[in-house]
Amino acid sequence: MTDASLAQSELAAGRAALSRGAWLEAHRCFEHALSAGETPDALEGLSWAAWWLEDVEACLDARERAYRRYRDVGDECGAARMALWLGDDHVEFRGAHAVAGGWFRRASRILDTLPDCPEHGWLAVFEAHAALGRHDLDEAVRLAGQARQCGRRHGAVDLEMFALASEGVIRIERDDVAEGMRYLDEAAASALSGEYENLASAAWTCCLLMSSCERVRDVDRGAQWCQQIGEFSRRMDATFLRGVCRAHYGTIQVWKGSWDEAELELVEALGELSENRPTWRSEAVVRLGHLRRGQGRHDEAQALFEQASDHPLALQGMAALRLDHDDPAAARDLLERAMRRIPHRSRAGRAQALELLLRADVALGDARSAQLRLEELRAAAAVAGTPALSAMLELCEGLVAASTGQHDLACDHFEDAADRLGHTGAPVDAARARLHLAVSLLELGRREAAEREVRLAHFDLSGIDAVAERAQAQRLLERLAADDRASGGRDGILTDRQVEVLSLVADGLSDHEIAERLVLSHHTVHRHIANIYTRLGCSSRAAAVAAASRMGLL
């Protein structure tokens, strides 16, 4: 066999190995082919084997050499293709956007002189994602559609379907959630069936689908696809895809209350996602941070959020920690910063941050702002149409009603939220709704109903190490056990509850801190203190404490 025929044989074997995920075998085949002479197609194949093996330097070196050799032999399409992948590599591996921009512009200039070819479509789809990143959604959807049509004209299924997946994400951002998810379903089905020639774009398609499921809280769809994608990534030895999939699956398991399994998925995802792909690795880092926060491991959570500080979910996680630490003002500052990164027209994408912002507003007693957040959340839930997001809206409706003393209305919303969250298989969120319901029931004097909801919340939390929710449930049980809603007071001057509130005032606690300690609303504590002033004939906290002490009430 001549050197040329041997090189062709090794080249074919290398391509076959790439198609079935045998990256080391592919690498050896392309190296053997290159030993007979440096050809651009062998260098291109070698670059993909190195890409999958996460040998960044070897990948970039092979791409650049392939680019030069394609130009040397007059294959301008090949040169443009290498320029495009080099641009993407510099973003993915190094976050070097300026360098990437240079390569993308080089590809564009070369393609300007060429007749229609698939590389025009790949340029369009990369430009679509750039437009999405700067929130130019009209331009993004135009470019993605252009890329999809180019793929269809040339029979390039991977281009056509990846463009379809990209268009799906853009449509979700434009609030066409149902259609966008259908686009992603189709593209993922094509990827997992083996239709894609370039497995990298198959991996990206799967990642786009999973992140979109999480974004709109489509828990059932995400759980179904996670299993399929996990099997595909194991079969293809796609370690980074498996890691990203596990990160998203871990979040779904947190929602579903399988926290032990979520821990396993997220920790192992972190192990599978190397520092060579910082963007992908941050997907696992920030989600593990959210789990650590739920487990009450706040220092670890903070460190993880700081490690992935550029990730959109990191700011939200830091804000949630501030809420846990009774600092709603700091939480609101962080969340408003996060919201500035999400365009107003992307209503579904703003929902998670809006929920936290509403909680901060309620804690700060800012009823007007909370109402504005609620109106935006209603629009987001209507757009997304997912059961989990609708249930979250009900919970927020209840929080706003309770914060203004409308406890009858709050109970209706909390009951609906608990029922819907129970049906969607989200036990921790369901327990949270039940605990809020119990507080409003106590405010209405419905002690037995409140106790029933606390017991149900305890059942929801069985086997789940949700620290904050368990602590709140325990405080409510202690309050119920002490029967501290008795209406009789000491010497008929103050009720037992008023004495309890005044004792905490004497200890120097603020209204917000008293509300947290006694599991009451800020509005209720304020009302109790006003009634204490009236009964004792005082007009200040210090005077009320002094008067009650003289009377032997404290």
Image (cartoon, grey):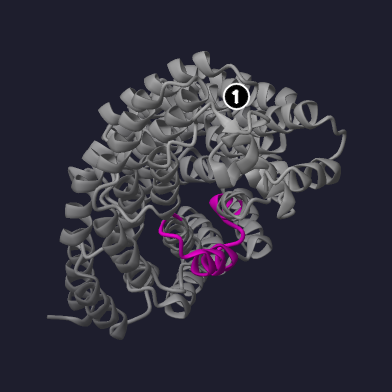
Q: Quadrant of residue 543?
A: top right
Q: Mark 1 highlights which residue?
A: 400
The residue under the point 43% across, 61% down is 292
The residue under the point 33% across, 56% down is 465
Can I make out residue 426 in this image? no
Residue 275 location, x and y as percent? 46, 74
Rate crowding at label 1 as few (under 14), some (14 to 19) or many (20 or more) other CA atoms within 10 Å.
many
Residue 177 magenta: no
Residue 98 location, x and y as percent? 68, 62
Q: Nearer the viewer, residue 34 or 441?
A: 441
Q: Nearer the viewer, residue 247 or 448?
A: 448
- Please identify the residue farthest to the bottom as the structure is shown: 35
Q: Nearer the viewer, residue 129 or 107?
A: 129
Residue 306 magenta: yes
Q: Nearer the viewer, residue 131 or 422?
A: 422
The residue under the point 66% across, 38% down is 363
- Secondary structure state at the residue bearing disc 1: helix
- Please identify the residue farthest to the left as the structure is shown: 1
Quadrant the N terminus occupies: bottom left
Residue 396 location, x and y as percent? 53, 27
User: Relative to residue 177, is residue 295 depicted above or below?
Assistant: below
Instruction: Report the magenta stretch's main SS.
Output: helix
Query: Viewed as shown, does residue 327 lie left or right of 351?
Result: right
Residue 141 location, x and y as percent? 54, 29
Can I make out residue 174 in this image? yes
What is the count of numbered marks? Answer: 1
Magenta stretch in the rendered image: 294-315
Which three-letter amino acid code belongs to the residue tagged 1? Answer: Val
